């Protein structure tokens, strides 16, 4: 039996024949830990009055009763040693000395520090040897037990069966219920204690105090120290006693291990053993969690590399494509729709963007396990490649892609910001279809930002732009758009362009356009007259409106495709 710091309780020493029946006062402090013994003269030699810090923790002070003879001296000595956190006072009665300890006993009871009245044969040499032998024997016993626990758990770790198997091993050593959760409080494993009443692991997680997940004041010096807690799982239930141990790797908190004692309060000897199991178990569970995290990171990195090569068509030949596709379970002859997810919270700003990106990627990956083929984060976006059926029915394929995009938006919106957008291209076959679909989805995303389209839209939803895509690449078309829009933009810094667009969008309804812009009708007329003079044509005529509409669409396409071409090369044919 040891205290939390590994020392022997004073009460345990009282079972020794030399010290049996010597307690005079301070029974409340029998749980104080003792690891060493010093004479009073040594404690006075090294005291630092200015510091005022406890420097005798775990030390039993051996002193002659003569130092406690006068009531005033006794009170001062006891108060000073209690302030310095001495574990116990061992008052030795030399041969022929008076052993009046009444004043010291009152002071010891008041300070809560045990006072032992030692017989003449219990001099400093004898008592210090006894305490040293007991402390060393206890330390050796703890080391031996800890080595056995570590070896048992290390054998489980070496087989690599995962965190649940580690939890079962801890249950086998401690006979306690074991709950393991990650740093976000998500349950990773739960194992019931044999023969114990079933407990709800979610109730245990909910009963843990907040600092068990966020700040960790009870865990110091970057080591896994178990903290005792009494948890009440329900208002009418009896409390349960638990040991909560942080799972630390390199000083970073990876999670928590909670050992639920079978009885409350637990047996002190069992609790001491469970502390050893908790600290060794938390260390090895941290190693397993780190290994699994590394494996997941490697898998995600490999999948991300494959998805990036797939959407960009970066394969040397069909043999490389086939080999990598088999590894990732990608059917090179299947039909796929590519979805692109974009939001401000996915931009590399702040410390949490990477965690949000990983969490959103996993949510998308698990959204439709039977139909979602591959998911990866690429260029501040999340790319989802969805397997679609109905190989000979393009209309059904596009409908399936649209429904999946809606589900994807609903699933990711709580995790990401309200400006979340999901776009998708037309379904296609094999690697070439994926590359073409990705290019269309990215083009749709760029157009959606410029045209204020719906948060979820596909390439077909902006089909008018798709029809003009090849035209917009023509030099004559670019010159036409520039010559049409530049005079209007110079006239009023882009304000007139916005007004003309609203006027055309409302089918030439002057009142509706004014309401949309929050503008007076007369002001609207004045602005349209200015726009007509700048364009050198009456914007209220159908031909002028079509001319302006066509120039604006070509200019938008030129801007979007120019930015897209800098990031994504046009899709190439599949490797042969």
Image (cartoon, helix red, strand yellow):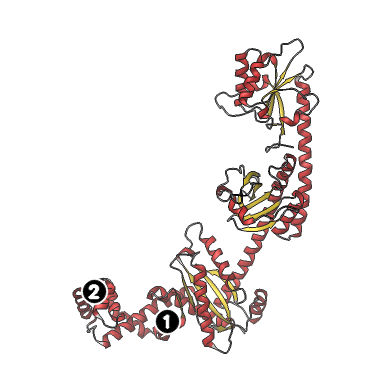
Q: Looking at the rendering, which quadrant does residue 370 occupy?
A: bottom right
Figure quadrant of residue 477 = bottom left
The quadrant of the rendering that contains the N terminus is top right
Residue 576, percent from left and from top: 62, 85
The answer to the question of whether label 1 and label 2 lie on touching residues, with beta carbons closer than 8 A, is no
Label 2 Cα neighbours within 10 Å, binned few <14 / some 14-19 / many ≥20? some
490 relative position to 28: left or right = left
Instruction: Find numbered disc 1 in the image and state the secondary structure of the residue it sits on.
Output: helix
Q: Determine whether the residue tagged by mark 2 lies in a helix, strand or loop.
A: helix
> Furthest residue to the bottom?
392
Circle 2 sits on which residue? 491
Q: Is the residue 265 above or below the residue 303 in the image?
A: above
- Seen in the image, is 443 located left or right of residue 144? left
Disc 1: CA contacts within 10 A as few (<14), some (14-19) or many (>=20): some
Residue extending farthest to the top is 96
Q: Which mark is residue 105?
A: none
Residue 123 x, y percent position in the rendering: 76, 19
Q: State whether residue 234 is above or below residue 49.
A: below
Q: Which residue lies most toward the right here? A: 17
**Dividing the picture into quarters, in which one does residue 452 lie?**
bottom left
- Calculate the distance from the C-alpha at mark 1 to the C-alpha at mark 2: 30 Å
Going from N to C along the chain, the mark reached first, 1 or 2, is: 1
Specify whether residue 483 is in view.
no
Residue at figure coordinates x 56%, y 82% from the top left: 432
- Residue 368 in the image: state x and y as whole percent: 59, 74
Q: Nearer the viewer, residue 407 or 323?
A: 407
Q: Is residue 410 above or below residue 150?
A: below
Q: Position of residue 241 (x, y in %)?
A: 66, 45
- Comparing marks 1 and 2, which lies closer to the viewer? 1
Which residue has dot 1 on it?
Answer: 462
As drawn, 474 above or below 384: below
């Amino acid at each position: 039996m040891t205290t939390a710091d590994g020392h022997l309780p004073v009460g345990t020493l009282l079972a020794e024949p030399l010290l049996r029946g010597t307690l005079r006062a301070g029974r409340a402090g029998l749980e104080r830990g003792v690891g060493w013994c010093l004479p009073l003269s040594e404690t006075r030699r090294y005291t630092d009055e200015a510091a005022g810090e406890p420097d005798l923790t775990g030390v039993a002070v051996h002193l002659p009763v003569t130092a406690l003879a006068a009531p005033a001296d006794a009170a001062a000595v006891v108060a000073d040693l209690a302030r310095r956190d001495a574990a116990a006072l061992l008052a030795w009665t030399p041969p022929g000395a008076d052993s009046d300890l009444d004043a010291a006993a009152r002071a010891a009871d008041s300070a809560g520090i045990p006072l032992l009245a030692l017989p003449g044969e219990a001099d400093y040499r004898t008592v210090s040897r006894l305490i040293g032998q007991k402390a060393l024997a206890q330390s050796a016993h703890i080391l031996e037990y800890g080595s056995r626990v570590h070896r048992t758990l290390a054998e489980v770790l070496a087989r690599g069966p995962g965190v649940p198997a580690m939890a079962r091993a801890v249950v086998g050593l401690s006979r306690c219920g074991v709950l393991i959760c990650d740093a976000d409080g998500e349950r990773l494993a739960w194992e019931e204690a044999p023969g114990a009443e079933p407990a709800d692991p979610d109730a245990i997680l909910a009963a843990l105090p907040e600092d068990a997940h966020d700040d960790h004041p009870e865990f110091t010096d970057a080591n896994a120290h178990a903290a005792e807690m009494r948890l009440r799982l329900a208002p009418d239930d009896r409390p349960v006693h638990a040991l909560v141990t942080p799972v630390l790797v390199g000083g970073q908190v990876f999670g928590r291990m909670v050992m639920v004692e079978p009885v409350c309060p637990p047996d002190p000897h069992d609790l001491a053993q469970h502390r050893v199991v908790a600290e060794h178990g938390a260390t090895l569970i941290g190693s397993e969690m780190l290994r699994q995290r590394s494996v997941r990171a490697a898998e995600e990195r490999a999948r991300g590399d494959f998805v990036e090569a797939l959407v960009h068509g970066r394969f040397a030949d069909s043999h490389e494509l086939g080999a990598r596709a088999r590894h990732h379970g990608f059917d090179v002859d299947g039909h796929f729709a590519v979805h692109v997810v974009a939001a401000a919270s996915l931009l590399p700003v702040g410390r949490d963007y990477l965690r949000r990106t990983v969490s959103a990627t996993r949510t998308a990956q698990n959204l439709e396990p039977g139909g979602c083929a591959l998911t990866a984060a690429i260029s501040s976006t999340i790319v989802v490649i969805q397997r679609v059926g109905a190989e000979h029915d393009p209309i059904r394929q596009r409908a399936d892609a649209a429904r999946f995009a809606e589900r994807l938006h609903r699933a990711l919106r709580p995790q990401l910001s309200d400006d979340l957008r999901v776009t998708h291209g037309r379904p296609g076959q094999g690697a070439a279809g994926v590359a073409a679909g990705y290019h269309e989805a990215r083009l749709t995303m760029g157009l959606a930002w410029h045209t204020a389209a719906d948060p979820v839209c596909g390439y077909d939803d902006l089909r008018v732009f798709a029809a003009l895509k090849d035209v917009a690449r023509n030099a004559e078309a670019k010159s036409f758009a520039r010559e049409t829009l530049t005079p209007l933009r110079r006239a009023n810094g882009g304000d007139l362009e916005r007004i003309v667009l609203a006027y055309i969008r409302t089918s030439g309804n002057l009142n509706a356009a004014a309401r949309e812009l929050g503008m007076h009708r007369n002001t609207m007329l004045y602005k349209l007259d200015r726009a007509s003079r700048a364009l050198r044509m009456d914007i209220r005529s159908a031909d002028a409106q079509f001319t302006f509409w066509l120039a604006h669409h070509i200019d938008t396409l030129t801007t979007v495709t120019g930015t897209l071409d800098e990031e994504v090369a046009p899709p190439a044919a599949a490797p042969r």
